[in-house]
Image (cartoon, grey):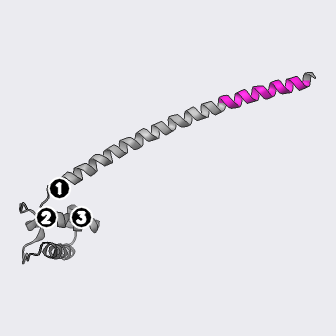
Amino acid sequence: MSSLLSGVGASAFYSTAARSSLKTSSLLSASSSTTMASASSTSSSSSSSDTASEFIKYVHMNPIQRIRYDYLKTHGLTEKSLAAMPASERNAIEDEIKKQIEKKLGVKLGNISTDAVASVDITV
């Protein structure tokens, strides 16, 4: 009988230890999740302010600047990357942008470069 009681006592001890371990594990997991959520929130907040800033810049662009911006973004380019290209490649892209401007706005730009046109303030 005494061995049966000691078995029950041991079982109760291990059960209590297991519950304690489970609680500690849950607390650590919750703490880790909170830390990760906080980091994600900070990243999301930064991303959100970048998006808002980008939107504000876009809203203040004239139609030609928007067409140029949209073309570059669609093709994975920036003004910096465009400027760094060899002249022949850059000129081909500038011609494509010019065609887009002429098509979307129904105007003829002739020999005017698109970056010169984009810098002109035309408020509609």
Say what secondary structure mark 3 lies in: helix
Residue 59: image tag: 1
Comparing labels 2 and 3, the label whose residue is closer to the camera: 2
Cβ atoms at labels 2 and 3 below 8 Å apart: no
Query: Residue 2, how many percent across, how many down?
Result: 91, 21
Quadrant the N terminus occupies: top right
Query: Residue 88, how many percent across, how many down?
Result: 19, 77
Query: Residue 78, how many percent across, how many down?
Result: 23, 62
Q: CA distance from mark 2 to mark 3?
A: 22 Å
Relative to residue 25, is residue 61 depicted above or below? below
Q: Find disc 3 in the rendering and name its residue.
A: 81
* Residue type highlighted by circle 2: Pro
Q: Residue at x 27, y 51 (%)?
A: 51
Relative to residue 36, is residue 86 depicted above or below? below
Q: Relative to residue 107, is residue 94 drawn left or right?
A: right
Residue 77, located in which quarter of the rendered image? bottom left
Q: CA distance from mark 1 to mark 3?
A: 23 Å
Cβ atoms at labels 2 and 1 below 8 Å apart: no
Q: Which residues are magenta?
A: 3-20
Residue 83, located in which quarter of the rendered image? bottom left
Residue 12 lies in the magenta-colored region = yes
- Mark earlier in primary sequence (2, 3): 2
8 or 112: nearer the viewer = 8
- Mark earlier in primary sequence (1, 3): 1
Q: Residues within 10 Å of mark 1 (few under 14, many from 20)?
A: few
Q: Main secondary structure of the magenta part?
A: helix
Q: CA distance from mark 2 to mark 1?
A: 10 Å
Q: Find disc 2 in the rendering and name its residue.
A: 63
* Residue type highlighted by circle 1: Val
Q: Relative to residue 56, is residue 42 drawn left or right?
A: right
